Structures are given as structure tokens and as C-alpha cells.
Amino acid sequence: MAAIGVHLGCTSACVAVYKVRRRGRWAMDFMSGTPFSAPSYTQDGRAGVVANDAGDRVTPAVVAYSENEEVVGLAAKQSRIRNISNTVMKVKQILGRSSDDPQAQKYIMESKCLVVEKNGKLRYEIDTGEETKFVNPEDVARLIFSKMKETAHSVLGSDANDVVITVPFDFGEKQKNALGSFKHDVKGNARAMMKLMNSAEVAKHSLSTLGSANCFLDSLYEGQDFDCNVSRARFELLCSPLFNKCIEAIRELLDQSGFTADDINKIVLCGGASRMPRLQQLIKDLFPAVDLLNSIPPDEVIPIGAAIEAGILIGKENVLMEDSLMIECSAKDILVKGVDESGANRFTVLFPSGTPLPARRQHTLQAPGDISSVCLELYESEGKNCAKEESKFAQVVLQDLDKKENGLRDILAVLTMKRDGSLHVTCTDQETGKCEAITIEVAS
């Protein structure tokens, strides 16, 4: 475990590290620079200043700009005489301040590098010969902090993301917030985001079979590497809202179809997301008695099903070659009897013969408001719209309805035919909510 402390002064910067090694491992004495055995180092820990690549324990807080590079530290300070107009010093005095700030006005007067106001913000005007560019004070400070972080990492041998940055006592909120934009935000860089998304996708696939996955990207953003290890537990926690949406969609589908979880005995997993162990477990929790079928890769299930359906539509009987395909369908037309405007009987087909089961239909029956009972009659027929009186097989009667002087009453009929051919019918008076229901079992 390691952490970094950084101090950015007006003229110089300094970095220290706090490093803890596991019991029995070596540790480095930062004061003497010699390794030593530290069996009890785990709890105590040590902090020490790290020298830069020139061997100095402090680094000049100076940044020099040239045509092709940005130089930070001692080299920038040594070249300031011949490159004075492109050398930025004491950036902390202007960091996070506006042009009407008295201290900023004093700094602008004294700075040898030209400071101008552009788009409402102060900028350094840098002339490299080829072009003139305008640099934010925050970008200058970021280069100094990057130098300090690089110095610390040269000793640690790895990245440390826990950092404390000191600020002067008189720093206001704007100055503190300016120090906070030092995080590397890759959202505005399309190339970095694409690299990150590709690596995240690979890690997601790995987590379907492994307990953890590593994401490493060389030079993700502005020369900074990205290294992150994600556990399956952490991944599942992040995706928990999405998993809940998936389960909620299944619940809504059950409600719409008129089924309960107990009516389902097999589930075919399809789509790449169904590989995720957590999502599979949530589905099993919702359907504890079902078998999850995943012998076919989830990405291939849907197109295979579409091809089978296409085969059915064109009349092929051997679409599965070796295996037979069994699809439960309604054997006859199921019709409901109504009355047209002339008073003649009218039959409406709700379930045409060959309808794949299970299936659900809705039908609104209109009746005069001055009658107190309504009867819904169901018929079956082997020919379209040719139902006969003797082919009536069920009726639902709503009785004791409140009469009303004018208008019609709407009766909503919901018919659900299950896979075994049984039919459940519910009739509801839309105005009063009065309801009657029947279930017609299949004749043995």
C-alpha cells in the first residue's frame, strides 16, 4: 500500500510517499535510501521525501515551453534567461483567480510571461515561433503535479492513486476547486474512451467465468497508463440497477400474459448478457422450479429461433433435420358472439386455428345501459366465421348491473389460452368494476 503527499509552493514543489509493506517483506528507508527488513512495518508505516531525477529533494515549480516540448523543473529554471517570455513561474499566485482580483493584477504586472484574458479566463500567451498558443494556469500546475507523481512512482515502482495536496491557508474555494481539475478526465477524448470501452468489454466477458479481471491500458490519456483490477462482486454491484431492470421486464411480461412464475417450466437464455452468473441467479430466484436452457450459445439462440420460425412459415416440416419441433397451437377458431348495428348476430374470431400457445386476447363487448345483465358467449368453429348455435361451448354472465338511462356500457373480456389448451375468461364492467371469471378445461 502506498500514498503520496504533494506540496506546490510559489517557487518549488516537493513530494513525499507513505509506504507499507506486508509482514516479512523489504521496505525502503527514505531518509537513508537503504533497504532494511521490516517485520513490524505493516502497522507503523513510514513517510519520506523523494528526490527527483537530479537528486534534489525539491523541484523548481517552473515550466518552460518551446516549439516541440514542455520542460518542468530544474531544466526549465536554468533556461529561463534565454526563454524568459515562454517560462511560467509562481503559477500558484494566479491559479483559480480572475482578472479583477488584486493579487492577480499584481502578478500580471510582474510576470515576464504575458498573461491575457481570453473567454473570461486568464491565460498565458506562449509564442513558440511557429504559433501562438494560450495556456491555462491549471494546465501549468498539472504539469508540475505530473512531475511530482512521476518522481514518487520512480521509487514506488507502481502507481499510487491516493494523493493529498496541500494548499495555503488563504486559498479560497475557487483556488481549491482549480486544484481539483487535476484529475485526468478522459470523457472528452473519444480515442481514450474507445480504448477504455474495449478493455471494459474484455473484462466483462472474463468475469462471466473468473472471479476477477484486470484492465490495463498503455498510455490511455496524456501518457498516463491505466491499470485496474475488478472483482466479480464489484462488477455485479455496479450492474445491480441494470439487473433489476431485466427482472422487472420479465415480471411485466408475466403480468401481460396472464401467467405466474409457476406456469413456466423451462427458460431459454438468449443474448450475451445472459452469460452473467448474477443475472442467471436472479432468474432462478424468480423461477425456482425451472430449468435454464443454455446448451446453445446465448448469442446464437435468437437467429436460430428466427430461422426455425421462417421454416414454419414456408411450410417446411423438417426444419430441425434430426429433431422434431413441437409447437402447441389452438385446434379450432375461437369466436365471440356479438350484435351489429342492425341487430343481427356477428361473430368475431379471437383465436384463429393454429394460433401458437400460450396466447392472450382482449375484446370489448358493448351492451345497452338499461339492462341489468350481460352474457358473453364463446363458440368454436373449424371454418372462418361459420359458427353455429350448437358449437357454443361457454358463456360468462355478468348479473345485477346498475342500470343507467342513456348510453352503452363497456364489458372488457380477457381470454388467456394456456399451452395445454385450457381457456381462462374474465369479464369486467369497465364502469363499476364488477367481474366474473370462468376456466374451461380441456376435455380428456
Image (cartoon, rainbow, N blue to C red):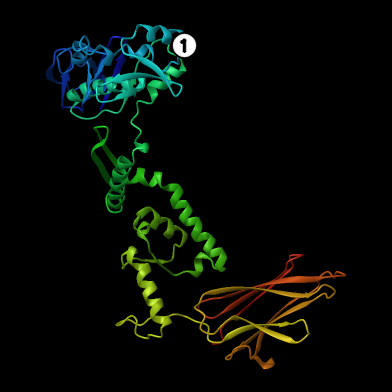
Picture quadrant of residue 109 = top left
Relative placement, left or right, of 293 versus 157 is right
Q: Which residue is mark 1?
A: 101
**Is 289 drawn above or below residue 279 in the view shown?**
below
Q: Is residue 87 visible?
A: no
**Residue 316 or 38: which is nearer the viewer?**
316
**Residue 177 or 421: which is nearer the viewer?**
177
- Seen at 42% across and 11% down, the residue is 104
**Is 287 drawn above or below residue 121 in the view shown?**
below
- Seen at 39% across and 17% down, the residue is 116
Q: Is residue 97 visible?
A: yes
Question: Picture coordinates of residue 11 (x, y %)?
Answer: 28, 9
**Residue 425 or 368: which is nearer the viewer?**
368
Instruction: Name the quadrant of the C terminus.
Output: bottom right
Q: Amino acid at mark 1?
A: Asp
**Is 238 drawn above or below residue 245 in the view shown?**
above
Question: Picture coordinates of residue 261 (x, y %)?
Answer: 50, 65
